[in-house]
Amino acid sequence: MEKQKEKTTIVLFSGDLDKAIAAFIIANGAAAYDHDVTIFFTFWGLNTMRKDEIVKVEKGWLEKAFGWMMPRGAKKLGLSKMNMMGMGPEMIKHVMKKHNALTLPQLIELAQEQGVKLVACTMTMDLLGLKQEELLDGMEYAGVAAYLGDATQAKVNLFI
Amino acid sequence: MMADIVVDTKGLACPMPIVKAKKAMDGMQSGQTMEVLSTDKGSLNDFTAWVKQTGNELVSHEVENGVYKFLVKKL
């Protein structure tokens, strides 16, 4: 008989490169532990899942302004410390390559391949003016209740 | 003891060693063994925990010239 799988849930609230990397390493590790893993993206964390190209969608001027000011996808995120106007992320990426660590886009791809459930918070998408078409394919869309539904059964719950 | 499969993760950083081991494990039958090679310094603690939590058996482990070798049996 198949035993009930353990669960891990992560809320990615931050839109910083270093924090997103940490979240995805934990998510991939948990998936390797055979857990059902959910990452719930809210506020700045949503930017991690933006497509890097410009997507034509109907928006008001304020939503457009948000769209232009926020990083467009995993490759554009800054560091939470030592960002130095974008020099920090380049330095980190160089060091990661040297140590053979996966890049954030690779970690996202691996998470998708391992069946990690990627959920975007629809309420904060509205606040930041982000549309479904602007986020990576294969995401699910939900609110706090769906997150809590997963989190209630999870022994590992993280807010990053 | 010869393992049924060898998973070489030398040079790969966390979390790749356990991700690769998990993928290999999924394709194994119960009773089969897998040898995992790793150069990640955290891998001794990682594999001890992972094998235990996933309900399998760490038959043996050794370190030689910075290469960790784990023999894991699928239960």
Image: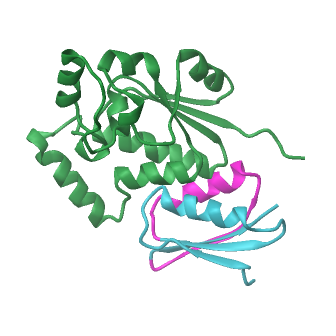
Residue numbers of the magenta segment: B39-65
Residue A77 in the image: x percent, y percent?
25, 40
Quick one: which residue is furthest to the right in this view?
A1
At x 9%, y 39%, the residue is A85
* Rendered location of residue B32, percent (x, y): 79, 72
Left or right: A129, with B36 as reference point? left
Vertical arrangement, residue A151 with respect to residue B4, above or below: above
Q: Is residue B55 magenta?
A: yes
**Vertical placement of residue B4 versus A41, above or below:** below
Residue lying at 17% horizontally and 22% vertically, measured from the top left: A65
The image's colour scheme reads by chain
User: Relative to residue A59, is residue B68 depicted above or below?
Assistant: below
Give x and y (percent) for residue A1.
90, 47
Specify whether residue B13 is painted magenta.
no
Say above or below: A38 vs A93: above
Report which quarter residue A128 is drawn in. Answer: top left
Chain A is which colour?
A: green
Task: Residue B75: give x, y in percent of width and height.
Answer: 82, 61
Q: Is residue A64 left or right of residue B68?
A: left
Residue B35 relative to residue B29: left or right? left
Q: A160 or A39, which is in the foreground?
A: A39
Chain that is coloured cyan in the picture: B
Hey, which residue is sitting farthest left in the picture? A85
Q: Residue at x 36, y 50 (%)?
A: A104
Q: Residue at x 41, y 24 (%)?
A: A42
**Which quarter shows the N terminus of chain B?**
bottom right
Q: Residue furthest bottom?
A: B2
> Which quadrant of the view contains residue A49?
top left
Total labels: the figure holds 0
